[in-house]
Image (cartoon, rainbow, N blue to C red):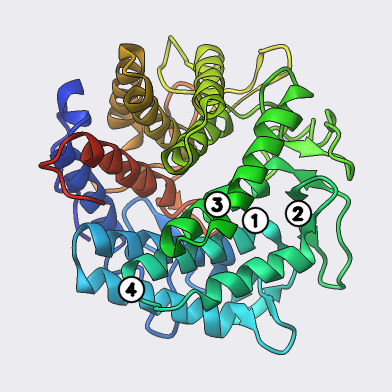
Amino acid sequence: MPQSTQSNTASPKTFYSRDFLLEHAKSILEFYNPRVIDESGGYYQNYLDDGRYFDEKSRQLVSSTRIVVNYASASIIYKSKEYLAMAQHGLDYVEKIHWQQEQQTYAWTLFDHQADDMTQQAYGYAFVLLAYAAAKKSGLISTDDALLQTYDLLEKRFWQADYGLYADEISADGILSDYRGQNANMHLCEAMIAAYEATQNKQFLMRAQTIARNIVLRQADLTDGLVWEHYSTDFQPDWDYNKDDPKNLYRPWGFQPGHQTEWSKLLLMLNRHAPETWLVEAAKSLFDRAYKVAWDEQYGGLIYGFDPQGNWCDDDKYFWVQAESFAAAAMLYQATNEAQYLEQYNALWQYSWDHMVDHKHGAWFRVLKRNNNKYSNEKSAAGAKCDYHTLGACFEVLRVLASTNSSDVAV
């Protein structure tokens, strides 16, 4: 098994540097490469800490598409034909196995390359669109057809024109669920931004702007200026949904600090393409409030969830929360030149470096207890983790650094 090649000593000065981020992202990729490739199709998605598989046959649409994004993006940054071929391998699987031609739908999960769950999830379609955007940027596809077709499917199946947001789920029998949530909309905003960057088609940018305004301004105004997770069919806050399940993988109860900071990142990405004052102001507010409530002064890192009164309801430490937050902090530092954001970036990185990064085997641990002890030796799992967030955060900070230093590569 390959070992992590990056030294486990790093200072705050080096965290905010091109060389550090390029080396660290490469070390993450080396954990997965080449064992991620299943020669019979698609990617292996379930790994123990040392890289061994614990379930070789299960596949989930989000992981299948996110790993395409990982390698397509890395192929650009590292100018790697190997990574590009690995992205193509995964995209072929999405198009030939996840996609069910007869029904014109995507299998949410597969087992042994056979459709296992045919529930249609807007959250999954978001990452299909993101994968096609990454494929277009990297040169795997040459036209916008696949992106436009995915947009049209979303429009027909999930778009709620009266509210300017997407619904979440359609059962295998074709019944639209009453559940409405922000998470699918957040990732659809992300995908629309990427689709705009890949195509320069303003249709994608305009939809991203609509989603952002409706979630961060209209919806958050109903919940004290923070983004709540769950809504009724008319997009009124559902304060009780999963109240007894704050650790739910996709729909946890409570305010999610990581989603506040992830929205900060997305708002600043929108500001990059179409500057508006409110975007920076809202990005600052969401980040500042989340960090203030969720930073653990005793054990470090940001906790997972807090209730409407600001009390922690889930004090676990998740990899993606730290990653999205350090990306947002770097972008806020770039946008405002306020030193606190660089300090918070370094604090998040120092915590992650000390506890989340696996310096023995590579990549990041998925979730830790509040005191930073591990729950298990499962590092990555289908639908739960493929280091998409950690790689994406590194790549986004590289983009920040490239825009502020002419000697850096464009990413």
**Which residue matches tag 4?**
139
Q: Give the image location of residue 188, x and y in percent.
A: 61, 52
Residue 94, above or below 303: below
Q: Note whether 104 is above or below 312 in the view shown.
A: below
Where is residue 200, by image quadrant? bottom left
Q: Which mark is residue 123?
A: 1
Three-letter code, disc 1:
Tyr
Q: Of callouts 3 and 4, which one flags the residue occurring earlier in the amino acid sequence?
A: 4
- Find the distance from the CA under tag 1 to the CA under tag 4: 25 Å
User: Which residue is identified by label 2?
Assistant: 168
3 or 2: mark nearer the eye = 3
- Which residue: 30% across, 16% down? 343
Count of numbered badges drawn on the protein: 4
Q: How would you rate the neighbour count of disc 4 (Cα within 10 Å): few for under 14, some for 14-19, many for 20 or more?
A: some
> In the image, what residue occupies the spot 47% across and 71% down?
56
Crowding at label 3, few (<14), some or many (≥20) Cα neighbours within 10 Å?
many
Q: Mark 1, mark 4: which one is toward the viewer?
A: 4
Secondary structure under tag 4 reads loop
Question: Above or below — where is 314 with respect to 268?
Answer: above
**Which numbered disc covers residue 205?**
3
| Coordinates of residue 365 in the picture (x, y in percent) | 39, 42
Q: Which numbered disc, 3 or 4, marks the residue closer to the eye?
A: 3
Who's the residue at 41% across and 39% down the image?
A: 272
